[in-house]
Image (cartoon, rainbow, N blue to C red):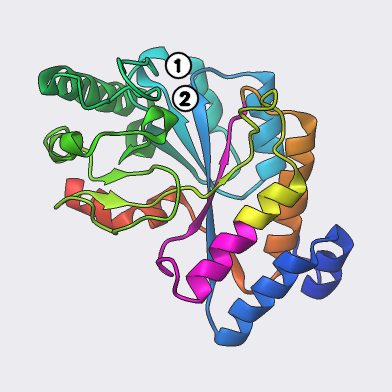
């Protein structure tokens, strides 16, 4: 499902999102590319919901954070037929909560290092076996939480990058570990797990783009959109469809494949 470009100003106004259109204009006037990337979490099996997401995406690249212990061969077969560039990230091991205190985490500080290392290594091996070269050396930990004490384990397990949530504090949180995060979560986790709403999603999107442009955030970090196709509703699909129409139509916006986003870390892990 290819998308043809449209006149940028007209298409942005038609979408009713003047704030995003204005921010993209600022990027264009500065001669910069407003880079974006898309991460979809909790993938495990082929499904009608996955088909709908891929139909919305068309040729736009998506990075799927796949749960290694639950991943099915049917998912690999389906993603291999996708129109756009597909990257597979390692979504922990089993998406299991091991936290005894505080918020949910598969890798909380109280876990033994040996147990964490074993799961990281097993997850990397399983994804390579299922997805081959599409399995990138990138960890996207469940709930976007990963204790810093485990960062030294990543390189030893063949993982050269990590993706969590929020503006990154450092490109390299640990020697040999590159970081690129997501910034716009489309799910309202406290309000029924439906769409968070266009106003909130656009506020987060434009806020991160503006922060990058003004130097508040790392300008080199692409703005990341996070979806969850397994629970995604039609309102989220409509938002994504409009978002892609606006950004693909604007010459200052550019969607990156995961291989581009994490190139520095992937190269170090090879």
In the shown orientation, is residue 20 left or right of residue 184?
Answer: right
One can see residue 2 in this view: no
The image quadrant of residue 94 is top left
* Residue 161 seen: yes
Residue drawn at point x = 44 percent, y = 75 percent:
215
The foreground one among 127 and 90 is 90
Is 10 in front, or is 208? 208
Residue depicted at 38% across the width and 36% down the height: 140
Q: Please state the total of marks drawn on the protein image.
A: 2
Q: Which residue is mark 2?
A: 76
Category of crowding for the residue at label 2, using alpha-carbon neighbours closer than 10 angstroms: few (below 14), some (14–19), many (at least 20): some
Quadrant in the rendering for residue 71: top left
Mark 2 touches mark 1? (CB < 8 Å):
yes
**Residue corresponding to mark 1:** 73
Give the quadrant of residue 189: top right
Residue 50's place in the image compared with 250, above or below, is above
């Amino acid at each position: 499902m290819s998308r043809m470009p449209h006149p940028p100003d007209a298409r942005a106004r038609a979408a009713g999102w003047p704030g995003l259109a204005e921010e993209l204009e600022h990027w264009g006037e500065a001669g910069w590319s407003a880079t974006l990337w898309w991460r979809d979490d909790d993938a495990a099996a082929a499904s009608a919901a996955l088909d709908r997401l891929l139909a919305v995406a068309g040729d736009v690249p998506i990075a799927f954070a796949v749960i290694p212990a639950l991943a099915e061969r049917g998912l690999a077969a389906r993603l291999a037929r996708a129109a756009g560039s597909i990257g597979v990230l390692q979504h922990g091991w089993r998406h299991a909560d091991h936290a005894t205190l505080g918020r949910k985490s598969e890798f909380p500080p109280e876990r033994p290092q040996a147990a964490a290392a074993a799961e990281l290594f097993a997850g990397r091996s399983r994804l390579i076996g299922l997805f081959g070269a599409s399995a990138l050396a990138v960890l996207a930990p469940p709930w976007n939480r990963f204790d810093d004490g485990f960062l030294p384990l990543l390189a030893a397990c063949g993982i050269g990058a990590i993706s969590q949530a929020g503006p990154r504090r450092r490109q390299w949180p640990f020697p040999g570990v590159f970081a690129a995060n997501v910034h716009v979560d489309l799910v309202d986790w406290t309000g029924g797990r439906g769409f968070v709403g266009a106003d909130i999603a656009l506020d987060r999107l434009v806020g991160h783009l503006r922060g990058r442009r003004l130097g508040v955030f790392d300008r080199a970090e692409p703005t990341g959109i996070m979806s969850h196709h397994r629970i995604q509703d039609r309102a989220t699909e409509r938002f994504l469809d409009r978002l892609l129409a606006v950004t693909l139509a604007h010459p200052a916006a550019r969607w990156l494949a995961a291989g581009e986003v994490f190139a520095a870390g992937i190269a170090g892990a090879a």
